[in-house]
Image (spheres, rainbow, N blue to C red):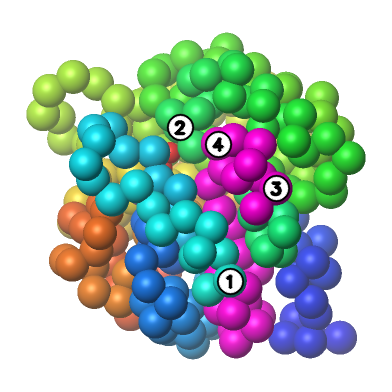
Amino acid sequence: MSTQQLSAKEKIQELWGTRPLIISGPCSAETEEQVLETAQQLAATGKVNMLRAGIWKPRTKPGMFEGIGTKGLPWLQKAKELTGLPTAVEVATAKQVQDALTFDVDVLWIGARTTVNPFSVQEVADALRGVDVPVLVKNPINPDLELWSGGVERIARAGIKKLGLIHRGFSSYGNTQFRNAPMWHLAIEMKLRYPELPIINDPSHICGKRDTLLEVAQKAIDLDYDGLMIESHIDPDNAWSDAKQQVTPARLKEMLETIIWRK
Ligand code: PEP
Ligand code: MN
């Protein structure tokens, strides 16, 4: 059976272990049109295996766009119907897990601001008990491998079998070259601790701007990462969050064609 004919759930079965796993889509779902158009353009590249979109956005300061909320989940369902791309969403509370599952989100991820908080990770883990859904755990915003491991172990103890890591870099004070310093050695240490888990690099949140994405993505591939999560938007400069780091699906395609992949 060709991949095109598989259901999203069957594709996930195939994808866990597929390399490279390329996840892309907007930082935030903004409108139905934006989600559908982005998904269609990403699918047309023929190089993306999964559609991401933030539905609930953990913003550093109040008064910013905090995500469209549950209203955006049917847009992702429709995007999946149109393109066949499985979907991935960040969850931080039990209610978000329930809502995401109600609307058939295929993969959940724990964001960097949630991994730092064992109460929150445990709440998500408890909501996942008895559910068969893949979960990716981003590194915490601070360079603390025990917190990252703790997050992974809480989700594993909830019975989640398809688990993975996302390396999105670590925050530091002041203006630095990266929005979040990659500290590659920490991610490599996690790779060694959990050799059976796929590790995905997120150049978007490491770089914080478009011009260095390719370099970081290439380095991750050279270091034998299993995939990339790169934010994309049909009109990046006017994105409602993370405008500076998003790229158009066309630019993403170019980047993916430029990267030298490991054999
Ligand atoms: C995101 O993926 O849009 C996001 C909020 O990422 P992080 O948790 O890495 O900051
Ligand atoms: Mn983002």
In the image, the residue with mark 2 has its CB under 8 Å from the nearest atom of ligand 1: yes
Q: Does the magenta stretch include residue 80?
A: yes
Give amino acid for label 4.
Ala
Mark 1 falls on what kind of element?
Answer: helix
Up/down of 100 relative to 46, above or below = above
| Residue 254 % position (x, y) | 34, 75
Location of residue 148 by image quarter: top right
Q: Which mark is residue 250?
A: none
Location of residue 191 by image quarter: top right
Q: Please report the residue visible at 82 percent of the width from the left and 69 percent of the height from the top.
A: 10
**Circle 2 is placed at which residue position?**
112
Q: How far apart are marks 4 and 3 (CA)?
A: 11 Å
Q: Which mark is residue 74?
A: 1
In the image, the residue with mark 4 has its CB under 8 Å from the nearest atom of ligand 1: no
Up/down of 71 relative to 120, above or below = below
- Labelled pair 1, 2 in contact (Cβ < 8 Å): no
Q: Please report the residue visible at 75 percent of the width from the left and 81 percent of the height from the top.
A: 3
- Labelled pair 1, 4 in contact (Cβ < 8 Å): no
Location of the C terminus (image quadrant): bottom right
Q: Which of marks 4 and 3 is nearer the N terminus?
A: 4
**Circle 3 is placed at which residue position?**
98
Q: How many numbered marks does the figure carry?
A: 4
Q: Residue 92 carries which label?
A: 4
Q: How far apart are marks 2 and 4 (CA)?
A: 10 Å
Q: How far apart are marks 1 and 3 (CA)?
A: 14 Å
Give amino acid for label 1.
Pro
